[in-house]
Amino acid sequence: MIYLMIVDRPIKGTCVFTGEKVCFDGPCGFFDNQDMSRPVSEKHALEVGFTVDPPTLEKIQNLLDEGIKFEEVQESAHHEIDFLEEDS
């Protein structure tokens, strides 16, 4: 099974399925059976499907949550600016 996993250091190698050269500089990469010594090319992983290991899924969820919070703050700030401009 192919997994999307967080990469904390650059990884170079050869795709275990296609023989293509692979380089993952981060933040994540594709690997066979959660083994970072068995890289999988992005193209192959997207073609055949992949799953996500728990730490990567948690990181993605945290990033999405932070993005939603950021959007809410931005929207609130824009409303406040519009309100202040109307009062001027």
Image (cartoon, rainbow, N blue to C red):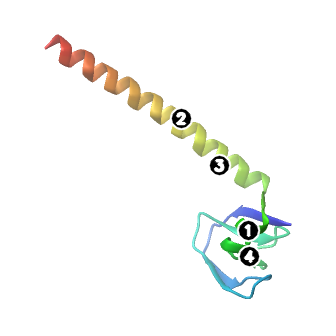
Mark seen at residue 47: 1
Give coordinates of residue 5: x percent, y percent: 72, 62
Near mark 2 (Cα within 10 A), the count class, few <14, some 14-19 or many ≥20, is few
- Residue lying furthest front: 47
Q: With respect to residue 69, does 10 lie above or below?
A: below
Residue 17 image position (x, y, % from top left): 80, 82
Q: Residue 77's image quarter? A: top left
Identify which residue is drawn at 46% across, 28% down: 72
What amino acid does circle 4 point to? Val
**Label annotation for residue 60:** 3
Q: Which mark is residue 40?
A: 4
Who is closer to the viewer here, 62 or 47? 47
Is disc 1 placed on a helix, strand or loop?
A: helix
Q: Nearer the viewer, mark 2 or mark 1?
A: 1
Quarter of the image with the C terminus is top left
Residue drawn at 47 percent across, 35 percent down = 70
Marks 3/4 in contact by CB < 8 Å: the verdict is: no
Which residue has dot 2 on it? 68
**CB within 8 Å, label 4 to label 1:** no
- Disc 2 to disc 1, C-alpha distance: 30 Å
Q: Earlier in the sequence, mark 2 or mark 1?
A: 1
